[in-house]
Image (tube, coloured by chain):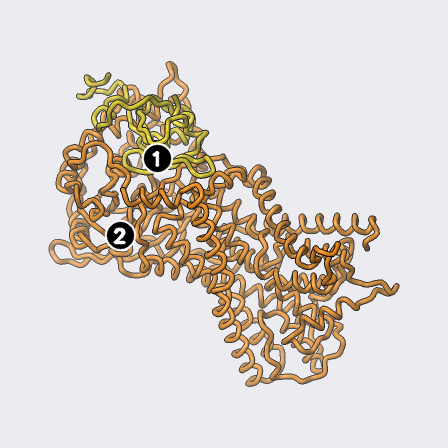
Chain colours: A orange, B yellow
Amino acid sequence: MTAAARVGRRSVSDTNQEIERPGIVIIGNPNTGKTTLFNALTGESARVGNYPGITIERRVARLRLESASGVPLELDITDLPGAYSLSACSPEEKIAFDALLGQHGNIAPKLAVVVVDAGQLSRNLYLALQILELDVPVVIALNMIDEVRDDPPDPQKLAEALGVPCVATSARQGQGLEQLRRAIACALSGPPPRKRPPIQYPAALLADAARVSQALPEAWRAGIAPRQALALWALACVGDDELPDISTELREACRAARTQLPARDLDLEIAGPRYAFIDDLLPSVTSRHGDAPKRPISQRIDRVLLHPIGGFVIFASVMLLLFHALFRWTEPLTGLVESAVAQSQALLVAGLPPGWPRDLLVQGIVGGVGNVVVFLPQIILLFAFIGLLEDSGYMSRVAFLIDRVMRLLGLHGRAFVPILSGFACAVPAILATRTLERQRDRLLTMLVIPLTTCSARLPVYTLIISALFPAQMLWGWLPIQGTLMVSAYVLAMLLTLTATFVLGKTVVKGRQVPLILELPPYRLPSVGATFKMVGERAGDFLRGAGTIILVATIALWALLAFPRHEPADVARSTAVVEALQLSPVPQTSTATHRPQSDIDNSYGARLGKALEPVIEPLGFDWRIGVGLLASFAAREVFVSTMAIVYGMDDENDVAAPLRERMKAERKANGKQRYSPLVGLSLLTFFAIACQCSSTLAVVRRETRSLKWPAFLFGYTVVLAWLMSFLLYQVGRLLGFG
Amino acid sequence: MNLADAPLGTTVTIESIGGQGAFRRRLLELGLLPGTGVTLMSIAPLGDPLELLVRGASLSIRRADAAVVFVRPAKRTSLRPQAAACGLPLAGDSWAGSTP
């Protein structure tokens, strides 16, 4: 097991405990401005946790109100994930249902604020009806009212038709918020209206529902929700679902209803009357005849952005910009973090007496904090991009344009951006999988992202290629070094695609779910909301994954720094541990002579030697073994570790001398120790193995399990070993050794 | 005719929805019911998926999935016939008389 995985078990605690009072939930279709409304109502930054037993973000904030009589009220308000309906066939879709009914570790809410897009009433009201049927007290926010100025629906009429308070709002422009707060306060203090929408279900369906309601679990029956509505929910959902917590009894009752003869269309019997009810009430609420046409502005923009040629040119440009930004724009900031770390380390080294406590502080703790903070620029930039793309509506178009390609891999078009970001750095890319709706897609994407060529691999590739391969042209025109670099990228891409395909069919099977993608109208993105989201994500990373990365860095430091031989070897072990940070420490402390290192004494080196029989068939010796171990802190650390293994002094520029040194290294029989074949083998190993504790830490955080990071590590290392083994052994047989 | 074969830019009326399970239920819940008008707005540059306009919303589904939605050319679009055309025996329903 890896250091990161070992550490992970005790370092992360979920933040669920703090949120356990009955409160209010905000619920609505996707793209209805739910989260904007949530932010506008609460105004403060939300606490981000998780729903019980599932890794979907739960945002909760305090809502302060004043009741009609002037008594201050304070409640928790939860922003539920966007949903088109309460029906669910997977645990993540069941969140809204569970949260509304107070099941599965949730507390039953006192009130649901249902956010309805004023421009798309019929589909939005479907969800509202489902919630009303469950007898949950409701206040309707008729949101985005500003977008339908020419023909606004009448909130008063809608309130009459549904029997619940209804307020016209525009969360974006801060319109109607005061009225909404008053309506909420009023609904909380008054008796809950128990008016259910008079939906006319077929008699046969109601008979089925009555039978199924006998099989409902005790916990469901104890709540306020009427049995008929619960039975209808079960009839719709239980069947080909992936719900873990449905009793056999209920399952059997639903199956009996579905398989009875003569065959009936239960789904249509449930959805049809609801829409019939909606279609019947709409004419009294809005004067619009027929369905709204697509908004002309969106249509015009789409004509350009979805154009067969122009659309792809723009798509490619936006993605290139994103990629370029991740690679280059973050460099100054990353550099700033690195130099800040280096300077504080230098100060500490100068101010403290030498010894292992100082090294622990300097190399382990300060270096570890640096290892965490160094990811922030990329995380912030990536999420700012994603936020703006999502908010403007372009993200859905990205998925629309590229879905044909992603479908071949068994993934959703939305997985494109996270995988692309992986070529910059796996850590923000894995965090970005949160934009995927399905748990299965998220997991699959997380498991393949580490195969993409992240930027931390580049210094290693450069070292290996420039040290072990001649800067010559093959056949007079093909630059060997450049070709190798390109091949490394091509290999990574092929592996990513293959792994996605294979893992999607084996390890994270899940059902292939047909794509249903909404292309929302284009809107100006809200910068404030994006900033807020970015801040939350960054904070979550620091608290969650950050702690694991810090501990892993300290553990790796200890591995290579102990046991110590005081005091003569202080200098050397300092040198060893300095390899563990992202940037070299200025040499303020020691001008000491460093002998040709035999760091054989450290536990890390012992481990490297113990590993030698395993890595020897790949052409590696124990020195590379130590380098591989050390590169768990960050891949590029491989370079500085190799330098220390060879006892190099000037760490500010190790690349050139190290290159020469590795080239000159001979075996006992006088042959070159690191042949180009070893180089190829090492390149292959680095391209595939997920030897990055930060990536493993983030996967651990995002999946809330040790199983998946362990699997990720296991499959990549085994695959890397096998590929390197094949390459090296076949190469040797062919006489390249 | 199925929805995947509908000419680009035309509005058609849904006759029936085939397919099964969660996907079919999701389409129904999004308001693709027998009698509902659907416009095929665009096709993604790589030939798939399709963009549909249903009840004022742009939805995108894949060609293979659209093939289970059977449609006929639309005569007119209005709200009432959509609801009534579900053709369900509604218990005590005042609209039952308008079912074609």
Give the residue furthest to the left: A69
In the rendered image, residue A264, in percent from the top left (x then y), is placed at: 36, 19
Residue bearing mark 2: A37
In the rendered image, residue A690, in percent from the top left (x then y), is placed at: 61, 54
Give the residue furthest to the front: A476
Quarter of the image for residue A243 reads top left
Q: Is residue A576 left or right of residue A201?
A: right
State whether residue A608 appears in this view. Answer: no
Chain of the residue under label 2: A
In the rendered image, which quarter contains the N terminus of chain A?
bottom right
In the rendered image, which quarter contains the C terminus of chain A?
bottom right
Three-letter residue code for mark 1: Met
Chain of the residue under label 1: B
Q: Nearer the viewer, residue A548 or A726?
A: A726
Vertical order, A371 against A345 (above or below): above
Vertical order, A658 against A284 (above or below): below
Residue bearing mark 1: B41
Secondary element under disc 1, as helix, strand or loop, is strand
Three-letter residue code for mark 2: Leu
Q: Is residue A16 left or right of residue A668?
A: left
State whether residue A609 appears in this view. Answer: yes
In the rendered image, residue A496, in percent from the top left (x then y), is placed at: 59, 47
